[in-house]
Amino acid sequence: MQFNSATLDELASRIGAMLRESPARDIERNVKALLQSALARLDLVPRAEFDVQAQVLARTREKLEALEARLAELEAKLGARARPAKPSPPTEAPSA
């Protein structure tokens, strides 16, 4: 049995048509529609917006850390001023 190019092309087009009209194709479309519907209901943000918000959060954390360090420094200075000087320990009189 010998096949020529036209016969193979016709066979390929028939198989392609059968696949386009098959239940498997309908199932694929239904699954895609189901997934798109489910994803649309989720509260998702675009990646670009997420990246911007991540950068804002990183800058905010840096500012917070700088402010915490500054606050600790000011509290240390204030604490040093508020503490009374420690009295020196009493000295013993020499015994005679």
Image (cartoon, grey):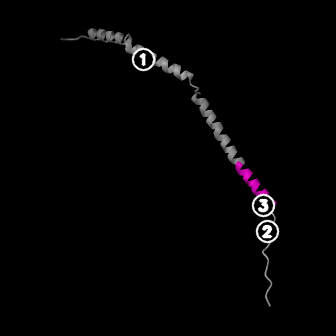
Q: Earlier in the sequence, mark 1 or mark 3?
A: 1
For the residues carrying marks 3 and 2, which lies nearer the camera in this image?
2
Which residue was labeled with disc 2?
86
Mark sitting earlier along the chain (1/2): 1
Q: Which residue appears at 30% of the width and 8% of the height?
A: 10
Residue at left offset 52%, top offset 19% = 37
> Quick one: label 3 or label 2, which is nearer the N terminus?
3
Residue indicated by mark 1: 28
Q: Nearer the viewer, residue 63 or 84?
A: 84
User: Where does residue 40 sit, x and y in percent of width and height?
Assistant: 55, 21
Q: Identify which amino acid the numbered label 1 is placed on.
A: Glu
Task: Using the image, tell me which numbered label, if any, was put on residue 71.
Answer: none
Q: Tell me if residue 34 comes above or below residue 10 in the rendering.
A: below
Pinpoint residue 30: horizontal percent, then vertical percent: 45, 16
Q: Is residue 76 left or right of residue 22?
A: right
Asked if the magenta segment contains residue 3, the reply would be no
Find residue 80 and name its label. 3
Check the image and report above or below for 56 versus 88.
above
Indicate the position of residue 29 as horizontal and vertical percent values.
Answer: 44, 15
The residues colored magenta run 68-82
Q: Is residue 4 left or right of residue 85?
A: left
Q: Amino acid at mark 3?
A: Ala
Residue 66: image location, x then y, percent: 70, 48
